[in-house]
Amino acid sequence: MALLEIRDLHVGVEDREVIRGLDLNVDAGEVHAIMGPNGSGKSTLSHVIAGKLGYEITGGQILFRGENLLRMEPNERAAKGVFLGFQYPVEIPGVTTMNFLRAALNAQRKARDQQEFSTPEFLKRIREVAGSLNIPQDMLKRGVNVGFSGGEKKRNEILQMALFEPSLCILDEIDSGLDIDALRIVASGINALRSPERAMIVITHYRRLLDHVVPDVVHVMSRGRIMKSAGKELALELEASGYAQFEDAA
Amino acid sequence: MVAVQETVERVKRIDVDQYRYGFETLIDSEKAPKGLSEEIVKFISQKKNEPAWMLQWRLKAYRRWLTMTEPTWARVDYPKIDFQDLYYYAAPKPKKSVSSLDEVDPEILKTYEKLGIPLREVAMLEGVEPKPGEEDPARRKIAVDAVFDSVSVATTFKAELKKAGVIFMPISEAIREHPELVQKYLGSVVPTSDNFYATLNSAVFSDGSFVYVPPGVRCPMELSTYFRINERNTGQFERTLIIADKGSYVSYLEGCTAPQRDENQLHAAVVELVALDDAEIKYSTVQNWYPGNSEGKGGIYNFVTKRGDCRGANSKISWTQVETGSAITWKYPSCILRGDNSRGEFYSIAISNGFQQVDSGTKMIHLGKNTSSRIISKGIAAGKSQNTYRGLVTAHRKALGARNFTACDSLLIGDKCGAHTVPYIEAKNSSATFEHEATTSKISEDVLFYCIQRGLSQEEAVGLVVNGFVKQVLQKLPMEFAVEAQKLISISLDGSVG
């Protein structure tokens, strides 16, 4: 059984069909890249897997470890191990990153009937994780993403991914707005989290990220469908020939 | 957007019927006949064994009130109040005169216990005393004056306060025991002719708290008054007078609750603060009167006049309020900055949900030289409520070097509510520096989704965002109450989105 199984998914937004019969299987241990032009439905796919409101599922299913994901609230999905790294992480003034992470982690643990972390336990854990990603303690004391640079925001996403230890990580254009150094830091954070138990879906426009985070499978998405799937060499091919061929075919 | 539509649907299902303090206490009470007349004013004064000067003071206010009309400038809407259809005096029927806690009706003590207000000093003292130097904030002592309907039923820690020279007692007692102080200061900040509700209060107030802190004394504990309206159709008109003499300091907190009733109840209090040279008064309010039900029925009409006078040089008055209850709130805790270098502060969190209407803010009146003031107002509107900040900052011709900073932030939850900011700014000299900042934001779907994707429930996510929004003000409350207030905020917003 695949970790994530998407069958003939159809999704509408305000009477317009944006995903039109999508199939995707992702196994534990695999890293899948989804590439495609703007408006091809990549971000919509990530939102629908995570459970964002505002989308109408008009057909198909999403199974996560064989369970119907579409019946679950977004926080239930999070507790089951679904993590979405956001393209535009939001700012939450007045709530320190530390408090936010603790509330979220304990909410997930509670949902899984695990004991909630006490303050000292949590502090120990967050220091370990932040240390391994070279994230300064000072960043944890600031409001969630408030006044963070683009690079810091994305590092904060990776920090959360490392802390929550999800089994499915969807990273939506995690490379957007990063300079080369920040990209390298974020990529090494992602690589450190690759494991046989964990699957990743990396959504990106550019090959650049995939030079650092080498995928097992590359999919090309256009107009709400996966048009082609192949190995990592597909990313190179796309960079040379562009997306136009797939747009015409769709 | 589809998503916004869903939030709107959820807001429609809003439920404010979660008021925890809506129970009623069944006790015998003694009431004055319904309605208001000179006879009723005399009746109240007589019940309180007041001296003649006090009765004259009340009658003067009453006669003045007859010539006044209700103010209509606030952004609140309610049916006309029939002032003859109210009881102006209700008191728990005492078995005899109450001189110690043991003689207080056990039903009343039980009520306060239910509300979590410790009236029994002994219970407070049972805890291990913290060693000197390492003060345990959770065990800090708080002296409480409890006002039940119109009458003060118990004041704790009187003896200990007396040792420090602090007078903390029901104002009805202070009128008899410290007439010189009361006569000197009562009505000196809010004159009997001030406004419709303050004048009404001056005529019929039956009790409230009185505090006097002598020169150079730092009050050894937090002082607190707890107000409870129990009787039907009864107006509560309490009167609080706090005087901080030269170089003294006092921190005072008031809390309020009322039973859940279908009819509206009137609350028209007056609070006067006087700070002399180098004195400081910190006044905090956690107001949780019954807000009415989800159809907008019932709830307290809260028409309150609160004003502090920084009468001495270098004095300071700080208002902190957390307003979550009442059907209608009409309240502007203000500072008159008379003394040179005096400072006024106003920190406010006003939350409205359901059909609540809030028109609240402050006035900072700069009269002395180099006076400064700071206003931080956080309004949160949910449901179908209307939340208005109304503030006045003014500098007199002689108030050279006056400075003010104002920040008014509003947060909207859903799209059936409203937030309004009405600042009035007047500078009559060119050396004044006034700054005003205002923002209005919405808890966006994106922020909620971000939190929920991380594992938080919808309610937890709203609570987190709101607590972040109000943090700056919560930090100004005494520690024990900050925790209470934080809980109160999450209860008030329960069901506001889903």
Image: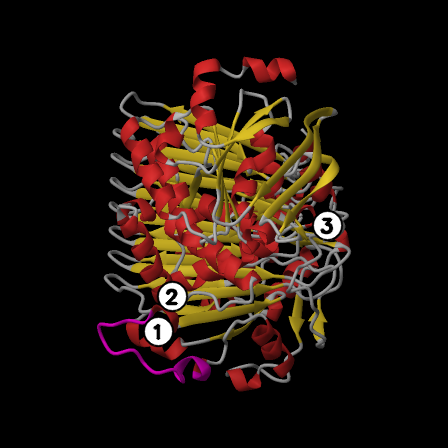
Name the residue nearer the viewer: A173 or B156.
A173
The residue shown at (48%, 80%) is B120
Looking at marks 3 and 1 on the same chain, the residue that comes earlier in the sequence is marked by 3
- The percent position of residue B2, horizontal first and vertical second, equals 69, 32
Q: Amino acid at mark 3?
A: Phe
Residue A36 rendering spot, x and y as whole percentages: 53, 23
Q: Specify the segment rendered in magenta.
A: B122-136
User: Residue beneath label 3, please?
Assistant: B83
- Pointer 1: what residue? B161
Mark positioned earlier in the residue sequence (2 or 1)? 1
Q: Is residue B268 visible?
A: no
- Tag 1 subunit: B
Circles 2 and 1 on the same chain: yes
Main secondary structure of the magenta stretch: loop
Q: Nearer the viewer, residue A241 or B497?
A: A241
Of circles 3 and 1, which is in front? 1
Pointer 2 residue: B222
Question: Is residue B218 found inside the magenta-colored segment of the image?
Answer: no
Which chain is indicated by disc 3? B
